[in-house]
Amino acid sequence: MTTFISKITEIGPRIIRILGCNPGPMTLQGTNTYLIGTGRKRVLLDVGEARNAEYITSLETVLQQQDTTIDQIVISHWHHDHIGGLSDVLKCLHEPVSVYKIPRLEKEDEPMPHLISYIPLKHQDEIKTQGATLRIHHTPGHTTDHAVLELVEEDAVFSGDCVLGEGTTVFEDLHSYMTSLQMLVKMCPKIVYPGHGPIIEDPVPKIQHYIDHRNQREKQILKVMNLETKKFLTAMEVVKAVYKDTPEHLHLAAAENVTNHMHKLLKDGKVVSQGDRWCLVQRNGKL
C-alpha cells in the first residue's frame, strides 16, 4: 500500500520535506527535497525538476512561513529529477548560494547556471548549518556521483536514490552499488529519509533485503552458468532460464538486469566475456 506524501511535511525541528510535484513511474509520488537546519539560513538537499512552478511555490511558501532562506544547496546526484530545478530555485533566492556536489566520474557535469560553480564534494566532507551537521558519504552504483548524507545529530541518513521508501532502485554499476549498500548497513542508521517514497523507520532490514535480493539473483544466474559450463551465453538466454515466471514483455528489462549482474561477476573474476556473451570461469581460473 502506497503511503501518501504531502507537498510539505515538517518532519522535525530541523527537517522539512518538500515534494518535487513530479510523479511518475521512476519518481513514485515525486522527488523528495529537504530543507535542513534550524537557523535563518538553511541547507536544501536536491531541487526537483526544471520548470516546475508547483514545486517552486511550495518551496517559497516554506521559506516565508519559516522566515528563512537557503545559503547552501547539496545535490545528491546528477539525475534531472534531483538537479533539474537548480536555476528555478536560485531565481527565488536573493543572496549568494553555495552549491555542492560530488563530481561525475564518467563525464563532466552539465554546465551550471550563470555565475554559479559547483563546490566539489568528496567522501567524509561535512557541511554545517545551524542545528545540523551533514557528513557526506560517496555511495556510487546508482550513479558514479551519488552521495548519501548522514545527519549527525539524529543518527539519520538522507539516502537519495540508493535506497527508496518503496520498491527498489535502478543502478549503473551493481558492483559499486552492493559496496554502497554494505556501507549503509555498517552505518546502522536509526531512520532513513529517501529521495523518493516515505520515511524508512527501520532501515537496516530493508537495506539488507536489497542486498539479499541481489545476492539471490546472482546465485540463480551462477546456477544457470554452471549448467552450461564452457558455453558462452547471452543475457537473454540467461533470462529465459532465470525469469521463467516473468511475462515475456518484461524480458528486455530483465536482460538489462542480468547484464548488470554479469559486469559485477566480471569484476569479481567469476565470468569472462566475449562480446555480449558470458561464460563461467572454472575453479582453476580457466574456461
Image (cartoon, grey):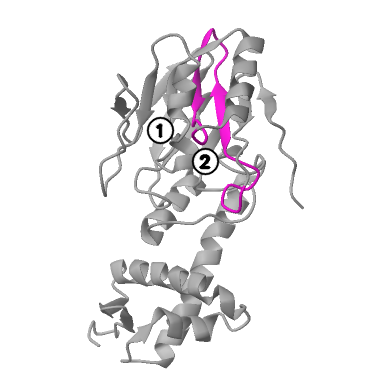
> What percent of the width, then of the height, locates residue 10?
68, 23
Q: Is residue 15 visible?
A: no
Report the front residue among 107 and 100.
107
Label 2 secondary element = strand
Query: How crowded is the residue under tag 2: few (<14 C-alpha within 10 Å), some, or many (20+)?
Result: many
> Relative to 174, does residue 104 appear above or below in the rendering?
above
Residue at horizontal 53 percent and vertical 54 percent from the top: 169
The answer to whether 9 is drawn above or below residue 185 in the figure is above
29 within the magenta span:
yes
Q: Which mark is residue 136?
A: 1
The residue beneath circle 2 is 159
Q: Which image quarter: residue 282?
A: bottom left
Residue density around tag 1, few if under 14, some if 14–19, many if 20 or more, within 10 Å: many
Q: Is residue 51 left or right of residue 14?
A: left
Would residue 55 be visible to someone looking at this image?
yes
When asked about the image quadrant of residue 267, the answer is bottom left
Q: Position of residue 225 (x, y in %)?
A: 40, 85
Contact between labelled residues 1 and 2, with CB atoms less than 8 Å apart: no
- Region of the chain picked out in magenta, as a range: 24-50
* Residue type of the residue flagged with mark 2: Ser
